[in-house]
Image (cartoon, rainbow, N blue to C red):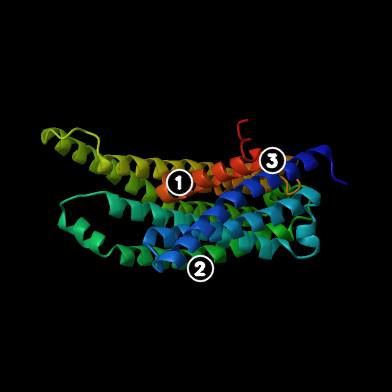
Amino acid sequence: MATELDNIFLIVTIVEFIIGMLGNVFIGLVNCSDGIKKLKVFSADFILTCLASSTIVQLLVMLFNSCLIGLNPYLYTTYGIGKPAGMLLYLINHLTTWLATCLSVFYFFKIAHFPHSLFLWLRWRMNRVIVMLLTLSLFLLIFECLLVYMFTDITLNVTGESNLTLYLDENKTLYDKLSMINILLSLASLIPFFLCLASLLFLFLSLVRHTRNMKLSSLGPRDSSTEAHRTAMKMVMSFLFLFMFHFFSSQMASWIVFVSWNNRYLKFIMLPLNVFPSCHSFILILGNSKLRQTAVRLLWHLRSHIKGPNPSPL
């Protein structure tokens, strides 16, 4: 029977799900309708649409997992749901993270400017670079899925024990295997983080160089290029912050499984996992002029519709 804490967990999960769905559905609809009208898809809009679609699926899978854990964690093992649900969640998390990484790299090549021939060569082939990153993520996904399969297979097969740590202490080899798998998954997850961090650092260097050139030209430190640099840096920094928050929460949840599968704190460690897909969409909306203006017009229209027409003066 669900306790009061379980009810709180489910309510917060549903609220996070609704918030995330609103933002990502809005991004998908605006970009799709704009692409249909103009019969042209820009790379940034295409990546944003794919990211929003991936995040919508991610939110649905996370809601399904959270409801199962909130109602009865043993449903995972009793009906064999745990392994496919865990694999699907990891797959969609991987895809969402790498699409956000590709968006950060796209902003770097689109906005930053360096006279170096290698940068200019890569910038000219920016779309190919994005495709190569997605191909790299596919190869990493195959490797990581094998690790996740082994991890879930071991943990779910021993959930009948009251304490997973006590069980694993009797089998030191199994414990070391699980620890190594978790470390390898953590290292693989840090690759997109370092790519985004590199994009952020190079954007900063490009901004410093551009600002210095503007001052030397007596044109002032603020112009459209400067604002574009700062906006892109804010979006990449926001993604990095949310990614780190999501990463550490997932790591903590994984290690709590070692203590006890039915640990009551596992549910509340999972709540921060929904912050990334729920909040990132609104950061993307605020950082994209087209999405931001459309959102303002929509809110103004809704506000006018709720208030109704102003009465005409007598």
224, above or below 139, in the image: above
> Which is nearer the N-term, disc 1 or disc 3?
3
Q: Residue 41, how many percent across, how many down?
A: 40, 65
Q: Residues within 10 Å of mark 2 (few under 14, many from 20)?
A: few
Which quadrant: the C terminus? Answer: top right
Label placed on residue 268: 3
Q: CA distance from mark 1 to mark 3?
A: 36 Å
Q: CA distance from mark 3 to mark 2?
A: 30 Å
Q: CA distance from mark 1 to mark 2?
A: 40 Å
The residue wearing badge 2 is: 142
Q: Secondary structure at mark 2?
A: helix
Q: Type of residue at label 3?
A: Phe
Asked whether residue 14 is in view, the answer is yes
Q: Secondary structure at mark 3?
A: helix
Is residue 27 rendered to the left or right of residue 234? right
> Which is nearer the N-term, disc 1 or disc 2?
2
Q: Quadrant of residue 152?
A: bottom right
Q: Type of residue at label 1?
A: Gln
The residue wearing badge 1 is: 293
